Amino acid sequence: MDQPPLRASDADREHVIGLLRQASVDGRLTVEELADRAELAQDARTYDELTAITADLLPGGALPVTPTGVGGVGGALGERVERHRATLSSLDRRGRWRLPHRSRYVATLGSVQLDLRQAIMPGPEVEIELKAVLGSAELLVPPGTDVRVSGGNVLGSCELHLGGEAPPPGAPIVHVVLAGALGSVEVRAEPRLGDRIKEEAKRIAQRWISTPRPPAPPRAPRPPR
């Protein structure tokens, strides 16, 4: 008789989330991948499901039975701030790039665009300050990211489009500090184009399957020979 799958505990799930965070620090997972896998880990009900989530991150694919203390980098946000400026110019960061623990971007009569969907997190949390002075700043994060916003913009606009669902426990945390005057700042969660195409194709297929088909017209009788 086959043994039933071993049920996962809360400690098992927290342990796996810690392993995922460390994998992101090591550059093996992007922010988007970390958010997706953390959600899967939180929803996992068996030990086999947790093992599958980390199979490509651990030697031999084996999940340690006991936690190894792998987790976030405590106090990392107290490190120095990496500063960038776009004055009468544009600054664009996208694709696979490594985030510092703390960074500051200033757009003065210019524009700053940051895409974190394929970025590498240095730890479980990062802090990004976006300052727009007669300029614009835009930040894209993958769905499922825990975005915590503070600050504001004087005589300007601040738009947040983060969706209505709460991020899962263990999701990457991005602290966003808004500042500036007479500028615009936008922070939004948005899946990549390929993911949006897949989701739209899935919705179209589901609508096509669920749409009732009209009955076939009756066949005309054959003429007598």
Image (cartoon, rainbow, N blue to C red):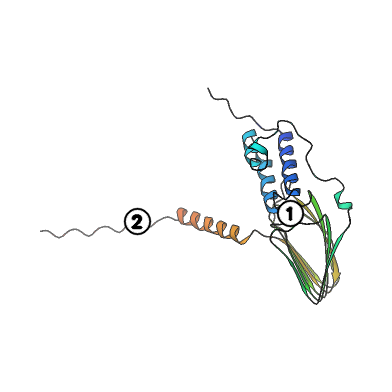
Mark 2–mark 1 contact, CB under 8 Å? no
Mark 2 — residue?
A: 215
* Residue 202 appears in the rendering: yes
Report crowding for label 1: few under 14, some 14 to 19, many 20 or more residues within 10 A (C-alpha). Answer: many
Q: Position of residue 168 (x, y in %)?
A: 71, 46
Q: Which residue lies furthest to the top in this view?
A: 1
- Left or right position of 135 against 201: right
Residue at the image position 52 percent from the left and 58 percent from the top: 201
Q: Disc 2 versus disc 1: distance between alpha carbons?
A: 54 Å
Q: Position of residue 40 (x, y in %)?
A: 65, 44
Q: Position of residue 130 (x, y in %)?
A: 82, 65
- Left or right position of 29 against 200: right
Q: Which of marks 2 and 1 is in front?
A: 1
Q: Residue furthest front?
A: 59
Q: Which of marks 2 and 1 is nearer the N terminus?
A: 1
Position of 48 relative to 204 (above/below): above
Mark carried by residue 67? none
Q: Say which of 214 and 173 sits in front.
A: 173
- Left or right position of 13 against 199: right
| Type of the residue with mark 1 | Ile
Secondary element type, mark 1: loop
- Left or right position of 223 against 177: left
| Type of the residue with mark 2 | Pro
Secondary element type, mark 2: loop
Mark 1 — residue?
A: 120
